[in-house]
Image (cartoon, grey):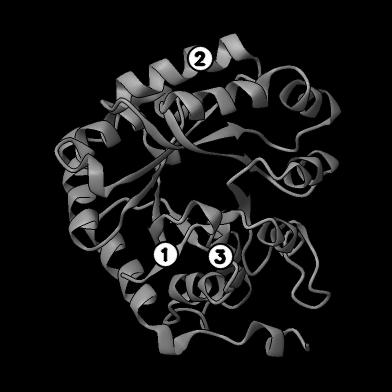
Amino acid sequence: MQYRTLGKTGLNVSEIGYGGGRVRPEHDEISLVNMLHHAMDSGLNYFDTAPDYGGGYSETIIGKAIAGRRKSCIVATKTEAYDPDGIAIDVEGSLQRLGTDYIDVLQFHGGWFYAEDTERILNGGGLAAYLKLKQEGKVRFIGFSADGPSGGIEQFIATGEFDMMQIHYNLMYQSTCDAFGRRGIIPDAVAQEMGIVLMRSTTSNAFQNLMKHCFPNEMADVDVDSFLLNYSLSNPMVNVALMSLQRIDDVDWTNAVSDNVDARLDLQAIHGR
């Protein structure tokens, strides 16, 4: 496993992070915990979850996996609430399910952050509540997750208050980081020394399904997953690529991609700049 620094947080984070969004109560607890222990033993230290993933089951599983190993783990979770009271309730619930007394990275859980959402966070007490949690030691760093660029995201970045951003970026989804024009919210965030964590790192199977549909014979023996993950990791502005690891095999192949640094791509050359 290779490591990068998560922006101005100074945290030494594994290039591959665990994305707990697909964990559901019907998934076997023992198998999940064993898989996460294997991931940790293989070098993974970044875990992303949220209270609504599996109705809290994702946080509970991660809490059991990190028990006894908390100091070596970086745990990121979220709040769907943007108001101070709701944020406090969400955080207390997360702390209980995770079995910890602090959260490494707390994020506003958002999609596009329309004007009303942005106003509630920046001027309605949301950001102030996050900063207070940092002062109290319940949260070490703060950020937000978003599906794509918006005026709200630009405002968040411009405040200089946020430590990181979790965002979509992959071979198909380029609007957050335009390698040709060298513009986008990822470069803007990096200019503010924010850490960058990716979701949909390998297109959530959209590219794989498209290629298999259009070129079924040609793609039969192509390792598209590794190709896509390597593409995302080839962007030097990226700190962590989240992956929804399901099995021990998933841990092993993603680690192999991380360690194959000689395969990294020159994205500026590829995009004609």
Quadrant of the drawing holding the C terminus = bottom right
Residue under the image location 42 percent in, 90 percent down: 262
Q: Mark 1 is on which residue type?
A: Glu
Element at badge 1?
Answer: loop
Numbered circle sitting on residue 80: none
How crowded pointer 1 is (Cα within 10 Å; few <14, some 14-19, many 20+) is rated as many
Element at badge 3?
Answer: loop
Asked whether disc 3 touches disc 2, contact meaning CB atoms under 8 Å apart, the reply is no
Measuring from the top left, give residue 30's x and y in whole percent: 15, 37
Q: Estimate the spatial distance between the alpha carbons at disc 1 and disc 2, rounded to whole Å.
A: 30 Å
- Dividing the picture into quadrants, the one containing residue 38 is bottom left
Which of pointers 1 and 2 indicates the residue nearer the eye?
2
Measuring from the top left, give residue 270's x and y in whole percent: 69, 87
Q: Mark 2 is on which residue type?
A: Ala
Which residue in the protein does label 1 denote?
A: 15
Q: Estimate the spatial distance between the alpha carbons at disc 3 and disc 2, rounded to whole Å.
A: 30 Å
Which comes before the other along the chain, label 1 or label 2? 1
Position of residue 245 relative to residue 214, above or below, is above
| Front position in the image: 62 or 237 | 237
| Left/right of residue 70 with respect to residue 10 in the rendered view | left
Which residue in the protein does label 2 denote?
A: 88
Position of residue 27 relative to residue 91, above or below, is below
Q: Mark 3 is on which residue type?
A: Val
Which residue in the protein does label 3 denote?
A: 238
Measuring from the top left, give residue 111's x and y in whole percent: 69, 37
Which comes before the other along the chain, label 1 or label 3? 1
Residue under the image location 31 percent in, 25 percent down: 101
Element at badge 2?
Answer: helix
How crowded pointer 2 is (Cα within 10 Å; few <14, some 14-19, many 20+) is rated as some
